[in-house]
Image: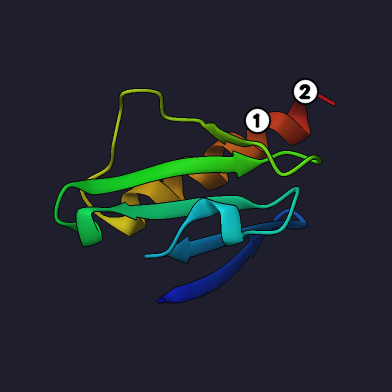
Amino acid sequence: MLKRYHTHLGRDIFVTSGSARELAPGSFGICAIGGGAEGWSVVHVGPEGDVADLGGEYYFATPEEALEFTQELIALMQAGT
């Protein structure tokens, strides 16, 4: 399984071709759909290990686009606290 690690404002972000269930609670995941051929989704793993799809029906063409979205989302979350 491919897994790249990033951090933004103290939050963990993993780019992975594997399952989001393999990610640690509290982390964000950018997950390949169909090996990346169908796009990339952005997820968050809650404290109990539950996975929430943050993009809904919206998927990204590249992992870089999904990473940028995730970083913006984390910045918005930090600004709201």
Q: Quadrant of residue 75?
A: top right
Residue 37's place in the image compared with 54, above or below, is below
Q: Which mark is residue 76?
A: 1
Q: Nearer the viewer, residue 24 or 4?
A: 24
**What SS does tag 2 mark?**
loop
Q: Mark 2 belongs to which amino acid? A: Gly
Coordinates of residue 53 in the picture (x, y in percent): 49, 32
Q: Which residue is mark 2?
A: 80
**What SS does tag 1 mark?**
helix
In the image, what residue occupies the spot 75% across and 29% down?
Answer: 79
Q: State the quadrant of the N terminus.
A: bottom left
Q: State the quadrant of the C terminus.
A: top right
Coordinates of residue 12 in the picture (x, y in percent): 68, 59
Residue 51's place in the image compared with 29, above or below, is above
Pointer 1 with pointer 2, Cβ within 8 A: yes
In the image, what residue occupies the spot 61% across and 41% down?
Answer: 44
